[in-house]
Image (cartoon, rainbow, N blue to C red):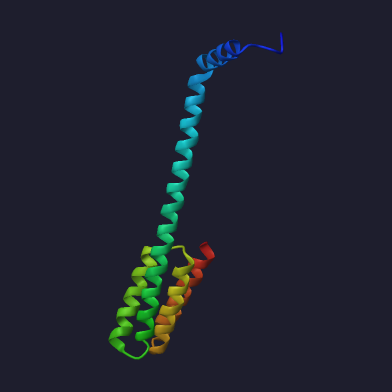
């Protein structure tokens, strides 16, 4: 085989290669692009869920701070915390919200409810 092939021979070899392997190259390209798009979409969805959990937890923290002195606000904060835990189970935020709920129960003098909240946290944390 000569090393100095002409330009036309090189073009013919490329065309032959593409005729034989073009479908495989196209399928591979589609798979790579589709996988990349899917992975980026999954990462974006995961990031959006984390941001939503952070925003909801910040809202709950503000309500818990206001609930330290007012019984009605304390009850509303506990309800908000319970809803947060139900919507974000298995997250570190849920454990922190549970601790805050236990603190609110303790400050209200509901020691048995505070203990129950702490037990729920330990059960949740041990299952992770």
60 up-or-down from 53: above or below:
below
Residue 118 percent location from the top left of the image: 47, 76
Judging depth in this view, the residue of 56 and 84 nearest the camera is: 56
Judging depth in this view, the residue of 48 and 128 nearest the camera is: 48
Residue 46 percent location from the top left of the image: 44, 55
Q: Work out which quarter of the rendered image holds the N terminus and state it.
A: top right
Residue 32 percent location from the top left of the image: 50, 35
Q: Residue at x 42, y 68 (%)?
A: 54
Q: Residue furthest left?
A: 72
Residue 106 percent location from the top left of the image: 42, 86
In the rendered image, which quarter is residue 84 located in? bottom left
Q: Residue at x 44, y 49 (%)?
A: 42
Left or right: residue 119 versus residue 87 is right
Q: Residue furthest top?
A: 1
Judging depth in this view, the residue of 64 and 10 nearest the camera is: 10
Left or right: residue 79 versus residue 125 is left
Judging depth in this view, the residue of 124 and 22 nearest the camera is: 22
107 up-or-down from 122: above or below:
below
């Amino acid at each position: 085989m000569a090393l100095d092939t002409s330009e036309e021979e090189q073009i013919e070899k490329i065309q032959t290669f593409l005729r034989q392997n073009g479908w495989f190259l196209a399928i591979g390209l589609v798979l790579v692009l589709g996988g990349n798009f899917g992975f980026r979409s999954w990462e974006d969805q995961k990031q959006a869920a984390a941001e939503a959990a952070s925003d909801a937890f910040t809202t709950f923290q503000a309500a818990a701070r206001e609930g330290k002195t007012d019984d009605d606000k304390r009850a509303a904060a506990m309800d908000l915390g319970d809803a947060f835990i139900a919507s974000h189970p298995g997250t570190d935020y849920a454990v922190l919200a549970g601790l805050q709920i236990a603190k609110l129960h303790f400050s209200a003098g509901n020691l048995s409810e505070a203990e129950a909240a702490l037990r729920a946290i330990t059960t949740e944390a041990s299952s992770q």
